[in-house]
Image (cartoon, grey):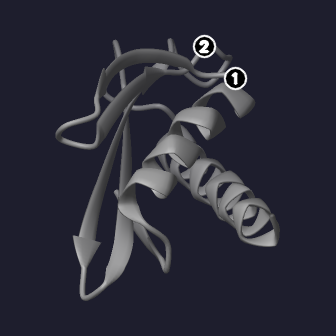
Amino acid sequence: MRTKEFARDTHVVFDACREVVGYVGWKTADVDSDELTLKALTPLSWKSFGDEIEIQVSTKGGNTVVTVSSKPRFSLMNWGKDLANEGVFLEKLAQEIHRYNSR
């Protein structure tokens, strides 16, 4: 599980999270706009049978906090793909938020 803080409105960050899920090639499985949670599924790869991603957006001290966690769908281990999924998502999200700030 990884977290990252952004100095943006929670709803703007949540919308950016929804866009980034598509950018990285994941399939949205569930969206709860009231709870600001998002679940997604990664495709199969040689490292895993796919992973479940859970994204939670919340506030902390005036900032918006995004927590992302990844776990294998069908196995106990996915050879470090969890950390890679979380890192890629947060990196792309930071780029998307930067793009929002540039508008």
Q: Which amino acid does label 2 sit on?
A: Pro
In what element is the residue under mark 1? loop
Residue sitting nearer the eye, 58 or 1: 58
Q: What residue type is labelled 1?
A: Gly
Quarter holding residue 10: bottom left
Say if 57 sits above or below 101 in the image.
above
Q: Would residue 9 be found to the left or right of residue 98 on screen? A: left
Structural crowding at the residue carrying mark 2, measured as other residues with C-alpha within 10 Å and reported as few (<14), some (14–19) or many (≥20): few
Whether residue 2 is visible to the viewer of this picture, yes or no, is: no
- Residue holding disc 1: 25
Measured from the top left, where is residue 54 in percent x and y? 33, 37
Residue 91: x %, y % from top left: 67, 60
Report whether 72 appears left or right of 83: left
Please rate how many residues cluster around mark 1, counting C-alpha atoms within 10 Å: few if below 14, some from 14 to 19, many from 20.
few
Task: Count up the numbered dots.
Answer: 2
Location of mark 2 (residue) = 43
Q: Which residue is drawn at 55% across and 39% down?
A: 81
Q: Residue at x 40, y 52 (%)?
A: 11
Identify the residue shown where x is 69% and y is 23%. 25
Residue 96 screen position, x and y as percent: 71, 55
